[in-house]
Structure formats: C-alpha cells, structure tokens
Image (cartoon, grey):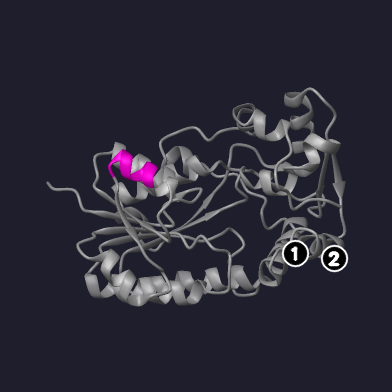
C-alpha cells in the first residue's frame, strides 16, 4: 500500500527537523513547510524532503502546502500570540483537503484555567483541531532538554550557576529527538491515538537543584541552582534578554506552574510510542558538552 505524503510544519525547528529525518528513514515522502529558505531547509532537501516556503498565517499558503497530503505534524514554532490564527488555518485547510491524521504540538501546562496566555491558546488549539474532524492527536511535552541552552547557556560556563524561579518543583527534561520519535510513531500508525493527549517526558523527574548535581558530575566543576523570585526573572527576560512581553508572561506563569508541581510527571510515551529509550540528562549533557562548556546566548542572567 502506498504511504501517504507527510507535511511537517516548523520543519527546521527543534522537533520539526528530526521528524522530517525520521519519517524519511521510515520510507515516507515528506513535504517540509518552512518560513524561509536557508541552510537548514537546504539540508532537509539534501535528505530527500520536498521544501515548500510560506507563511502559516497565510491561509492560501497553507492550502497549497496541504495539497495531496495525508498526514500532518503541526508545530507552530514562533512562541507568539498568533497560534490561534495558525491553528485556524491548519484546521480549515486540513478539513477541506480531507486529512486523515494530524499530530499537534501542545504543552503539558495547556488547560483552561492556566495563567499563561500561550498555554491557554494551546488548550484552545487542541479543541479546535478536535472539532475539525481531521484525526487530531496531541502531544504535551514537558520542558525540552534543549531549553537548558536558553536558560543556562551563559551562566553555567561563566559562573557555574543555574538561575531559575522553579523552586523545588520537578520535571523530567526530554530531548527534542525523543519527542520527534513519538510524533513519528503516531504518524506511522495514527488510528489508536486520535483524540488522545500524550504527556511526553524524559526518564527521570528531577528538581532543578538535582539537575545542577548532574551538571556538576558531568562537567567536573561545581554547578549550583539559584532560585530566583518569579518577578525578578520576568524582568530579566524582558530587560536583559529582550524577550517579548507575551513570551515573558508565559514563562513567568509556567515557572509558577513548575513550583506547584504541574510539570512533575514520568511517562513511558517515548518508549511505548517512539520505540526508543529517552535520553537521560547526563547523556544529553555529554552529547552537548561543547555547548555547556562555552558561553551561549542565555536568558538566565540574574
């Protein structure tokens, strides 16, 4: 039986790129929907992906990208207030095209009562995609392991510090490639997952202080966790890191959620659906030793 064409939005992003790669390895034809042509899209084309450039906020562009597609990975990579528009465009075009299955990137804190505007939009997006009757399923990952670059990319190598307002709450950081493996598992056999909301985690639920101990062991130097007040951290994000207000508000709300245990979970989704053991934090650090040993752009300065 001929395999359906797969569309991947946000195809050069942290999960989009490995989804393209892994679906190609599974023998699928993959169309990569990218915002612009650059070295990242050129690399995907070299692997065999069909590249389509366009704006997901443009309904006509989305309709064109979905022509002939059977299954979709929908990941809206800009963390901005435009998720509802992007979701509506995907829902309309996918419904009209007769898409049989769609995997939607959401987040573990998505719910009606959240104080985060972005998490609320993700909750809304899940419902809209369910109502579109396009075989939607939803993944709700915890913090990516890669988020540690954003939060500690400068402070760990320069100061041996992790500055975050996460308190004693826990989460199990999960690598983007492991999340991608779950997406691919669903795209390969979507029927059992339609309507489901899968929480995706790494192998161990840990406080940030416990993560600092792992960094200390792997880097061979002391790394300490400094627990910041949420208000101070939000100010740093906006005034020092230049983060948009919308995203800073989201992250501040997420920090409170983390303190309150919303992110604390350990699931077997990567093993069961992705077909692989999720990467541990120690293995992730070893694989990215250069990044954690030299200064990167960071949003963590106190």
Q: Which residue is mark 1?
A: 252
**x, y (%) of residue 182?**
43, 45
Q: How crowded is the residue under tag 1: few (<14 C-alpha within 10 Å), some, or many (20+)?
A: many
Q: Residue at x 48, y 40 (%)?
A: 177
The reply, left or right, for residue 150 in relation to residue 230 is left
Kindly identify which numbered label has been placed on residue 44: none
Q: Secondary structure at mark 2?
A: helix
The reply, left or right, for residue 235 in relation to residue 44 is right
CA gap between label 2 and label 1 equals: 8 Å
**x, y (%) of residue 245?**
71, 71
The reply, left or right, for residue 70 in relation to residue 198 is left
Is residue 133 among the parts visible in the rendering? Answer: no
Is residue 243 among the parts visible in the rendering? Answer: yes
Q: Secondary structure at mark 1?
A: helix
On whether residue 97 falls in the magenta region, the answer is: no
**x, y (%) of residue 203?**
59, 37
How many tags in the picture?
2
Q: Measured along the vertical axis of the image, is residue 297 above or below residue 138? A: above
Residue stretch rendered in magenta on the structure: 42-48
Mark closer to the chain start, 2 or 1: 2
Q: How crowded is the residue under tag 2: few (<14 C-alpha within 10 Å), some, or many (20+)?
A: few
**x, y (%) of residue 298?**
73, 49
Q: Residue at x 25, y 62 (%)?
A: 100
Q: Residue at x 87, y 54 (%)?
A: 228
Q: Which residue is mark 2?
A: 231
Cβ–Cβ under 8 Å for marks 2 and 1: yes
């Amino acid at each position: 039986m001929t395999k359906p064409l797969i569309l991947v939005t946000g195809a050069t992003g942290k999960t989009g790129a490995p989804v393209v790669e892994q679906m190609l390895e599974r023998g699928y034809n993959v169309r990569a929907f990218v915002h612009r042509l650059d070295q990242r899209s050129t690399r995907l084309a070299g692997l065999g992906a069909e590249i389509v450039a366009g704006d997901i906020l443009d309904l006509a562009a989305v309709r064109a990208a979905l022509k002939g597609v059977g299954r979709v990975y929908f990941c809206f990579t800009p963390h901005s207030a435009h998720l509802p528009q992007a979701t509506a465009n995907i829902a309309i075009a996918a419904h009209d095209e007769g898409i049989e299955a769609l995997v939607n990137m959401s987040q573990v804190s998505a719910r009606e009562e959240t104080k985060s505007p972005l998490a609320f939009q993700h909750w809304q997006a899940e419902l809209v995609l369910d109502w579109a009757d396009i075989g939607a399923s939803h993944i709700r990952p915890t913090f990516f392991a890669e988020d540690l670059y954003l939060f500690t990319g400068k402070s760990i190598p320069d100061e041996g510090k992790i500055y975050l307002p996460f308190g004693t709450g826990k989460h199990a950081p999960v690598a983007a490639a492991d999340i991608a493996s779950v997406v691919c598992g669903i795209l390969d056999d979507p029927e059992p997952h339609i309507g489901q909301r899968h929480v995706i985690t790494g192998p161990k639920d840990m406080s940030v202080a416990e993560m600092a101990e792992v960094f200390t062991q792997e880097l061979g130097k002391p790394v300490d966790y400094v627990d910041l007040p949420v208000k101070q951290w939000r100010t740093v994000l906006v005034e020092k890191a230049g983060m948009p207000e919308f995203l800073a508000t989201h992250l501040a709300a997420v920090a409170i959620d983390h303190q309150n245990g919303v992110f604390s979970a350990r699931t077997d989704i990567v093993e069961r659906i992705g077909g692989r053991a999720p990467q541990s934090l120690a293995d992730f650090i070893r694989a990215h030793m250069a990044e954690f040993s030299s200064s990167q752009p960071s949003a963590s300065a106190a």
